[in-house]
Image (cartoon, helix red, strand yellow):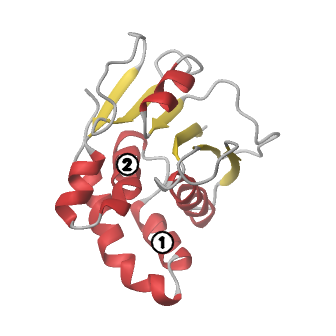
Amino acid sequence: MSYHGLIAAGFGGQGVMLFGQIISLAAMIDGKYTTWLPSYGPEMRGGTANCTVIISDEYIASPVLDEPNEVAAFNIPSMIKFEKTLKENGLLLINSSVIDRKPERKDIQLVKVPANEIADELGNLKVLNMVMLGAYLKATQAVSFEAVEEALKEKLTGKKGKLLEINLKAIKAGMKETVK
């Protein structure tokens, strides 16, 4: 059975919610069961935000996740908060552009992604979430790249359609990052 319990967390404005939505939508496109549960801090932009995504081959009883097997931390407070909830041998994906410290736990897999630098090199800092998504795809194979591409096409409509190409470039750049 394939199962992924992911918590993605960061500051509002870092694209954490879209990161989760794209993964969840891609899971549906791949024919899997999925849930997406957003959670916002008291402040919106600049405050903390996280979402829980569950992907499974079997029916999902609850969208709530106490012990994720994957955490994508976009900032230091998110790493500190969610590292301790991660299951043993779980995956911790960190944005090493802003997280300048090592996780405390030694019983987890770590992927360091210089997401801000990669996004900046691509010419748009806002795609750092898609860089992280690419690294997540590479590390987990939770969903297919084709399904992610389809999900992006569904989400980026109208004026946002012109952002499809740079988002796909960001995902491909993130897919070059590997477990350390």
Q: With respect to residue 35, does 80 lie above or below? A: above
Q: Residues within 10 Å of mark 2 (few under 14, many from 20)?
A: many
Q: With respect to residue 175, does 169 lie above or below? A: below
Which percent across, then down, holds residue 10?
A: 50, 42
Circle nearer the N terminus (1, 2): 2
Q: With respect to residue 43, does 64 lie above or below? A: above
Which percent across, then down, holds residue 6?
A: 57, 38
Q: Which residue is mark 1?
A: 152
Q: Kindly state the secondary structure of the residue where label 1 is placed.
A: helix
Q: Amino acid at mark 1?
A: Leu
Q: Residue furthest right?
A: 61
Q: Quadrant of residue 155?
A: bottom right
Inspect this view and state whether residue 175 appears: no
Inspect this view and state whether residue 167 appears: yes
Q: Which residue is mark 2?
A: 132
Q: Amino acid at mark 2?
A: Met
Task: Name which residue lies at 63% across and 52% down.
Answer: 44
- Marker disc for residue 163: none
Q: Residues within 10 Å of mark 1 (few under 14, many from 20)?
A: many
Task: Name which residue lies at 46% across and 36% down.
Answer: 73
Spatial distance from mark 1 to mark 2, Cα to Cα? Answer: 15 Å
Which percent across, then down, holds residue 20?
A: 56, 53
Which percent across, then down, holds residue 78?
A: 51, 31
Task: Name which residue lies at 47% across and 88% down.
Answer: 159
Q: With respect to residue 20, does 108 lie above or below? A: above
Task: Name which residue lies at 38% across and 10% down.
Answer: 106
Q: Is residue 104 left or right of residue 65?
A: left
